[in-house]
Every structure is written in structure tokens, then in C-alpha cells.
Image (cartoon, grey):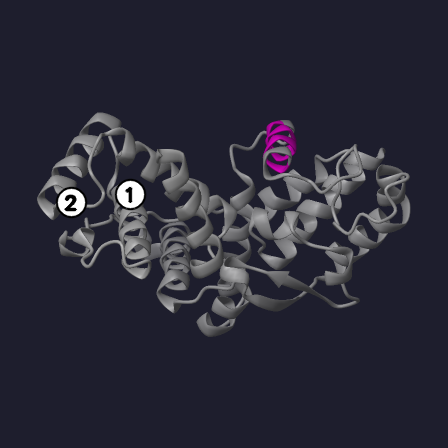
């Protein structure tokens, strides 16, 4: 019974909400935990859900952001029941949203990004693919899922067409350096990796000739970051892209559109990162920034 409920919810999130696969996996995971707790979805009250969330938060040591995700998953689930006419109310809407402490994104300096990319040995087809992949992610500020879902047809001479969250499409200009690496990959590496799978549409493929997975990208990046002596993740490249644009004088609205953020408030967090960098520069170089 629980598996059927989760399957229906997964379909609702994909077809009605058009959420990403990663978000759907998180939401379904939260619903599975909730169903395992034994609550009756047809009759559970707001008070019971609040008690459940409090218990989960304590046992799993969840931060405000994680609690908010749990509530969002449950809220969407009960909304799906309302849509189907299986329940009139949504008990989660009555619960207060937890306060989330603002976490500044991890950002690499331009020198660190260059050190990472230079650490990739592009002498074989996988290394050349990785150099092209991570150059493109940094050049265009891509999410990992966006990079993995790119098709060859999405790649153009001066830009790429990206399918982001909720299937929203946007066109992003490509830097000259990234374009040169992707062109080299398409000419020398991808044909070897694809082999006889001539119908494969994915831009970036693995050794088997099939589209790269998120897990494979994470694994390859971790190895290259370690070789470069850096403790960063793939998503750091996206954060760095946004921050470096703002540091270079780009306006916030343009950065929002390039990143594919639906709400400019999401983009504004990078202004805090930029301000932090300015403060550090002031304290380091301005005579009034150090104690006398």
C-alpha cells in the first residue's frame, strides 16, 4: 500500500509540479519515512504532524533548512491528496515554517578554479571529457543535473540551451575557453566513447557510451579536486560562476537569468558573498582596516 502511495506521489511531482529528479527523490524519501511512522494520511492532524516533525528533527539532528524540506515534501503530498479529492484540508499548511539561517555558498577563487582545471590530465578520452565538462559547468554556471541532461543539439557555436528546474529552458553564452575544450572533446573524445552507440544524444557520455550520471560526475570531480589540493564540490563551480560575475560588475537581474533562478531572492545570497570578499580586501589592503 505504501509503495503505491509513493508511486502516485512521485508521478504527481513529476507531471504536475515538474520538479527535478533530485528533488523528487528527496520528497519521496521524506514521505516514505512519514508512512513508516504509521500515521493515517486520511485522518492525521496538524498537531500530530508537528509532533512527528519535532521527533524527526531531534533524532536526525536536522537543521532549519532540512526541516523546511521535510515540511515542503509533506505539504506537497497532502496537496496531491486534495487535488485527487481524497482529502479536503492540508494539515501541513497550518504549521509554522522553521527559520533558516542563511548559509553563504562555498566559493572558489579564480586561481583555485584554474588550479582545479589545470590538474585534469586530458591526455586520454576521459580526461579530455572531464576538462570539457568542468570548463563548461564553470563557464555557464550549470547545475550537475543540467550538465548531465545536455544533448549534443543543445550545444551551439556561442551558447548552450539548458533545461533547468521544472523544465524551464534558458540560453547561456559560452566562454571562448570552454568552447575550445568542448569542441576538442566532440572531435577527439566523444566518438571514441560513444563507439557503436551512434544514436546516443547526450553531450557528455561515459566509458559505456551512455549519458553521464550525477554520481559519476561527483566521483570524477572529487578525484580532480583532491589532485589539485582543494576541498570543494562540483556545485562550488556554479557558486563561483555567480560570484565572479558579480565581482566583475554584472547586475543581479542578469545573473538571476543566467542561473535560472525563479526568485531573485535566491540570487541575492551571492551579493553577501561579494560583500564578504570586499570586506576581506578592505581589511587586508586599506590602512584603516587593521588595528593600530
Q: Which marked residue is nearer to the observer: mark 2 or mark 1?
A: 2
Report x, y in % for residue 153: 77, 61
Query: How far is mark 2 from mark 1, CA to CA?
Result: 19 Å
Please name whichever residue, 106 or 154, is drawn nearer the observer in this view of the structure: 154
Residue plotted at (14% across, 51% down) = 95
Q: In the image, is residue 222 part of the stretch drawn in magenta?
A: yes
Name the mark on residue 70. Answer: 1
Q: Report if the CB atoms under discs 2 and 1 are less than 8 Å apart.
A: no
Work out whether mark 2 precedes mark 1 in sequence or the reverse, and give the earlier one. Answer: 2
**How many other residues sit within 10 Å of disc 1, few (<14), some (14-19) or many (≥20)?**
many
- Residue 249 is left or right of residue 223, and the answer is left
Q: Which residue is mark 2?
A: 43
- Residue 39 vs residue 191: left or right? left
Q: Is residue 291 visible?
A: no
In the picture provided, is 56 more to the left or to the right than 203? left
Where is residue 283 drawn, in percent x and y? 35, 51
Q: Which residues are magenta?
A: 217-226
Amino acid at each position: 500500500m505504501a509503495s503505491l502511495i509513493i508511486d502516485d506521489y512521485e508521478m504527481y511531482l513529476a507531471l504536475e509540479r515538474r520538479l527535478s529528479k533530485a528533488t523528487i527523490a528527496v520528497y519521496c524519501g521524506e514521505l516514505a519515512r512519514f508512512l513508516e511512522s504509521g500515521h493515517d494520511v486520511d485522518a492525521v492532524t496538524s498537531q500530530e504532524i508537528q509532533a512527528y516533525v519535532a521527533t524527526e528533527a531531534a533524532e536526525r539532528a536536522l537543521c532549519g533548512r532540512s526541516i523546511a524540506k521535510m515540511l515542503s515534501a509533506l505539504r506537497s503530498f497532502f496537496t496531491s491528496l486534495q487535488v485527487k479529492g481524497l482529502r479536503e484540508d492540508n494539515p501541513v499548511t497550518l504549521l509554522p515554517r522553521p527559520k533558516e539561517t542563511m548559509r553563504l555558498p562555498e566559493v572558489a577563487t579564480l586561481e583555485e578554479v584554474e588550479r582545479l582545471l589545470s590538474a585534469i590530465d586530458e591526455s586520454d578520452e576521459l580526461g579530455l571529457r572531464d576538462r570539457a565538462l568542468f570548463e563548461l559547468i564553470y563557464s555557464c554556471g550549470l547545475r550537475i543535473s543540467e550538465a548531465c541532461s545536455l544533448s549534443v543539439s543543445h550545444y551551439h557555436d556561442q551558447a548552450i540551451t539548458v533545461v533547468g528546474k521544472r523544465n524551464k529552458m534558458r540560453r547561456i553564452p559560452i566562454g571562448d575557453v570552454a568552447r575550445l575544450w568542448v569542441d576538442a572533446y566532440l572531435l577527439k573524445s566523444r566518438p571514441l566513447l560513444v563507439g557503436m552507440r551512434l544514436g546516443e544524444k547526450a553531450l557528455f557520455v561515459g566509458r559505456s557510451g551512455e549519458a553521464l550520471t550525477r554520481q559519476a560526475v561527483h566521483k570524477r570531480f572529487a578525484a580532480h579536486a583532491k589532485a589539485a589540493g582543494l576541498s570543494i564540490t562540483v556545485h562550488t563551480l556554479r557558486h563561483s560562476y555567480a560570484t565572479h560575475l558579480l565581482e566583475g560588475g554584472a547586475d543581479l537581474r542578469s545573473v538571476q537569468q543566467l542561473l535560472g533562478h525563479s526568485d531573485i531572492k535566491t540570487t541575492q545570497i551571492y551579493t553577501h558573498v561579494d560583500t564578504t570578499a570586499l570586506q576581506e580586501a578592505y581589511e587586508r589592503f586599506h590602512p584603516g582596516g587593521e588595528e593600530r
